[in-house]
Structures are given as structure tokens and as C-alpha cells.
Image (spheres, rainbow, N blue to C red):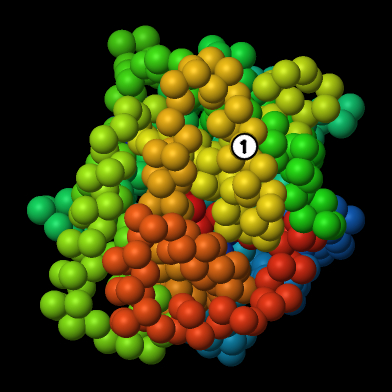
Amino acid sequence: MSDEAAKAGTHILVLPDEAATTRLARDIADILKTGDIVALSGHLGAGKSLLARAMLRRLAENPALEVPSPTFTLVQSYQTRGGDLLLHADLYRVRSPDELDDLGLIEDLERAITLVEWPDRAGARLPAGRRLDIVIEVDPENPESGRIATLSGGVLWRARLSIAIGARRLIDAAGWSEADRDFMLGDASSRAYERLTRENGENAILMISPPRPDGPAIRHGKPYSAIAHLAESVDAFVAMDKGLRSLGLSAPHILAQDLSTGLLLIEDLGPGLVIDENGPIPERYEAAARLLAELHRHALPTILPVAEARDHVIPDYDREALAIETELVLDWYAPHIAGVALPAVTRAEFGRIWDRLFDEIFASSTTWTLRDYHSPNLIWLPDRVGHARLGLIDFQDAVLGHPAYDLVSLGQDARVDVPAELELKLLAAYAGARRGNDPEFDLAGFAGAYAILGAQRNTKIAGIFARLDKRDGKPGYLKHLPRIETYLRRDLEHPALAELKAWYQAHLPKLFAGQAETAAEPAEAGAKGEQDPAPPESV
């Protein structure tokens, strides 16, 4: 298949045996959405029914599902495990597209996933926009078991097909073709994950991270993601992964990669949590603090290799990035949670206060800032030793920032309550390790930067969680808001933040109205180690 054909949305696949045909069916089933139409064409005996049965069984999550041919009934209905409608139509006996009106098939298309054999009999009745055409033929060079499948679809299918077919090629080339694939996690961003499991129980993770499309320009002609320095491609993950592993740290080993499509097959570091039913496990959190101290004692490179003649430049966590993140609280938390509309002069005052605080941050040297250094992204590996006992994931948005930022991510974990006493122990563990290598380490200055960056981070997260609810229809994140508000109030008690605290008291008093509340439900949810899908940017 030529690159031009793939770019045009057409893929030609050689399927050497029935197992390969079944795998294709499962791969396509995994990308189908309600309203999609899969049009299956080919001569009698070419394998259309084999494809349809395998897709329906995958969609229904029932490998033993009875799938009789609908040649005489014309349409057979099924359900996914979640209750969504599946339709399997065989139009071989249809002589005119008008006959479809009596079947009610056309009326059901928008609310179902529909598989149609002999779609040519429907004429123009099957909408083109959501239609994926699969033409399957006997492979003349392997007529007994081989098939050739040609897949084509409109603009809505190009990215989905490229990812599905690219993932299959990557998995097969890496020797994982027979592994079961289970969807793990998705979010409002374009990243998704699958866990692959071999018969012997061995696991790997498929990371699906296609290049990030630019959003609307919001400032200086740049989208939010560019201003906030969010990873634009999988290159950032690969580079940081290699950099961390070169230091002896436990980032996942990359087993295979397709950089252009944004696919990685990586080591599964396992289920080891740094929290339990009681919340943070103190010794594991303290180990995480000491790991940061070890990382920060090195002079680290700012450019990392990705592949031959391909490098990644780690961006600076600059003033513009820090500032635009704080503004999320003005744009989303203020109107949606606090119920206030802030005038321009008040917003400008907020910006001026932060600008002065950022001056203090930029007076210090920078280091790798992983940006998501908290419980969902830390994996305990008891069989390893030293700092390698902590597995690290989700670091593709890393920047060059103040060393206090990642310690804030840990000590003020957005997903689980970190008691103030434990937070102080983390600061002490970090400072002790830093002083062991640098007796001149300035703890007072570091503590001030910690408070400033804690306020910045929690201000950002309050805005993100409000936006996830209001804009993206994800209210589940609101259960964490009381925790974020508590952390923010804690940060504002530092003398360096007196002016910012006064601004919050004057303009967002809601932040302090819940100060005496226990927030028992969010604390309980976090302590149980429940994992939310990751928001579409670093928190």
C-alpha cells in the first residue's frame, strides 16, 4: 500500500489466515462508535460473514455469541454489554433500496453500530460520512486461507484507521500479535491506553498518542497547548523516557514505536500503588521525595534524543505558561463554581500579583519538571532497589522549571488527601537529601517557592476541574475540588502570598466559605485509590 493511498484514507491489508482476519475484525470493532456503519462487500465466500461475526462478538464482549446469518431476516439486532444497539444486516435479497423503508433500518442508523453485508443493494441510503467500506477478496496467491481487505472511509475515518492499522502492525512486529487487548484509559485529550496480555500472563501497554491538533489561537497567534507547553507529539515521551532510564530510574522500557502515528508499545510496570485504603503510604511518598532530590542534584541536559537525527528540546516553564494556567481559575472556577464574573480591572490585578510572585521563582536555577508527579503516575516496584523502586509514567509534558514544582505535585496530591504533617515530612525528606549533596541548600527560599508554586498549581487545577465539568461534561472531577481548595488555602498562609490571599478573599470568597467543611466524601474517594481518567493536560 502506498503512502498516498493511506493519506487518502485507503488501506490494503493482506490477511494470511483466518486468525489474521479475525484480528482485523476485532481491531475495527474497537474503534467503532454509535452511528458508525461498516459496509462489507465481496463475493460469496470471500469472508464477509467471518468479519461480521468476529466484530459482533467483540462489540458484545461475548466470544460465544450466536451470530446467525441474517440472509432471510435481513436485519438481526444485538446489544453491547453496555446496552448499545448493534445491527447486522444482509441485503443480498433486497432488490430495491426502497425496500429498506419497510425494515426500519435507515431510521435506526444514528442510534446503532451497523454492519451491512451487500451494501450496494442500499443504493445511496447509507450515509457516506459515517461509513467505513471494507472490501474483502480471496488472495489469489493464497486461495485456501488468505484474504485481501481494502478499507476506505471519509475524513472521519482517516485518523481512526491509521491508528488501528498502525497499532496492529506495531503489535505484530513486536511479537505480541496473539495477545488480548483491553482498553484501559481514555480522556478528553487524544491519548488512550490498552493493556496487552499474553497467554502466559505477561503484559505490555499500548500507548496511543497521535500528534496533538492545534486548538484555536488564544494569544499571540498560539493555542493554549503551545503556550502551556503541552506535548505536541509522542516524541516528548520517548525523549524523557530515555533520559530518565539513563539515570537508572524506572521509566517504562519502550518495546516498539511508531513515531509518525504516535504509537508506543511499552513495559507494563504493574499495579503497585503508593496509596492504600488509608491514603498515602508515608514511606513510599517519602521515597518519592528523595527520588526528586536525587534527580535535582544532577546537571541535566535540555535537549534529549528521540531517534536518529531527531531530538526533543525540553521547553522552559516560562512566565507565559505559568500565567495562562492561573487564568483558568478566572475563566472557569470563578463563573461556574464561585458564581462571580470578574471585571477586567480585577483580572489585571490578579495578573500583576502573579507576575511579582513569578519573579521570585525565576531567580532560581531550573531542572527537569515532570509536572504530573503524583499518585496515579507513581508505581511501587518492590522487587527493585534504591530509587528504581518507584516507577514513573506520564511525563510527556515535562518542562524546565523550579525544583519545588514536582514536590508540590506530590505533597499536595490532587487525587488523595495528604495531611499537613506528611507534607512537612516530605519537605524534610527532600531537604535532607539535598543538603546531603549540597550543604548550602537554601531551605527557606525553597519553602517560599514551594508555597508560590503550590498556589499556582492548585489555582490551575481548580480551573481545570471546573472546566471539565462545565465544558466537557465530566462532573466526577468536582469531588476533588474541596481538596484542591484546602491545599490552596494552606499555600496562601505563607507570608510571601499575603497579597494574593487578600485578592482571593476580596474576589473569590467562596474559596474560604468552605474552610470549616470536612470534605469527607472526596477524602474517602481518594483514600480508596480510585483512579480518574487523566484530564486533558498536566495536573
Position of residue 65 measured from the top left corner of the image (x, y, whole percent): 85, 60
Of 160 and 289, nearer the camera is: 289
Few, some or many residues within 10 Å of mark 1 (<14, 14–19, 20+): some
Of 190 and 337, nearer the camera is: 337
Position of residue 273 measured from the top left corner of the image (x, y, whole percent): 77, 43
Residue located beneath label 1 in the image = 428
Q: Residue at x 68, y 22 (%)?
A: 387
Q: Quadrant of residue 174?
A: top right
Position of residue 124 measured from the top left corner of the image (x, y, whole percent): 39, 72
Does residue 367 lie above or below 108 as drawn? above
Does residue 2 lie above or below 88 as drawn? above
From the viewer's perspective, is 382 left or right of 73? right
Q: Quadrant of residue 309?
A: top left
- Identify the image quadrant of the N terminus: top left
From the viewer's perspective, is 504 left or right of 121? left
Secondary structure of the residue carrying numbered label 1:
helix
